[in-house]
Amino acid sequence: MNEEINRALQTLKAGGLILYPTDTNWSVGCDASNPEAIDKIYALKQSKYYNDIVCLISDDRMLKKYIKQIPSAAINIIEIADNPTTIIYDDAQNLAKNIIRKDGCIAIRIPDDDFCYWLTRKLNGAIVSIPATVSKAPTPKSFKEIAPEVLKGVDYVVNLHHEKIFSKPSSIIKLSNNGIVKIIRE
């Protein structure tokens, strides 16, 4: 796994795109602070749909780097969640502007996956995670379902978990700074 982390890290630092497994699906990713790399994702996806973008981080300490005011409920949700949980936060910061939603929000998840953990730790930053599809095609449940144009459109394909079948996307919760909690997907 270390070799795969190092190759993916080199690609991210060079502004490239990676195709990698997360805890919920195969994703296309890049350094979440690199606007040019994010533009490459939009070109590959043939879409500039912000709502599909999630940033993956290693732990709740890293969250402070990207969210101005972390709602108190966030840490509790992160600690007790049994399933992968993506939280949409207000007031994103220190990320490329072209992934922050028009209302200033960003979706962030701390994945339960060793590869993602170590990649974000070594990058010391967030990585983009967007389903490995083109336009609005269904999210592939396995590596073999990934469209050829996605495979050809990335700079590096992580050689891990090619046999894994993903069955369930993450839960999505919107936590507003005004205390409103909205479950978007269970």
Image (cartoon, rainbow, N blue to C red):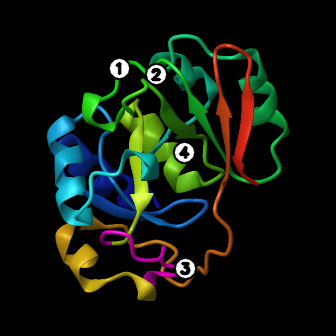
Between tags 2 and 4, which lies in front? Answer: 2
Q: Residue at x 34, y 51 (%)?
A: 49
Rendering coords of residue 139 (x, y %): 48, 73
User: The disc labelled 2 sits on which kind of residue?
Assistant: Tyr
Q: Residue at x 50, y 45 (%)?
A: 118
Looking at the rendering, which quadrant does residue 164 occupy?
A: bottom right
Q: Residue at x 48, y 78 (%)?
A: 140
Earlier residue among tags 2 and 4: 2
**Residue position for label 3:** 141
Which mark, residue 175? none
Q: Please rate how many residues cluster around mark 4, counting C-alpha atoms within 10 Å: few if below 14, some from 14 to 19, many from 20.
A: some
Rendering coords of residue 69 (x, y %): 58, 11
The stretch of residues the image draws in magenta is 134-143
Looking at the rendering, which quadrant does residue 125 occupy?
A: top left
The answer to whether mark 3 and mark 1 are in CB contact below 8 A is: no
Rendering coords of residue 129 (x, y %): 43, 52
Rounded to the nearest angstrom, the CA distance separating label 2 from label 1 is 6 Å
User: The disc labelled 1 sits on which kind of residue?
Assistant: Asn
**Residue position for label 4:** 117
User: The disc labelled 4 sits on which kind of residue?
Assistant: Tyr
Which mark, residue 94? 1
Rounded to the nearest angstrom, the CA distance separating label 1 from label 4 is 19 Å
Which mark, residue 66? 2
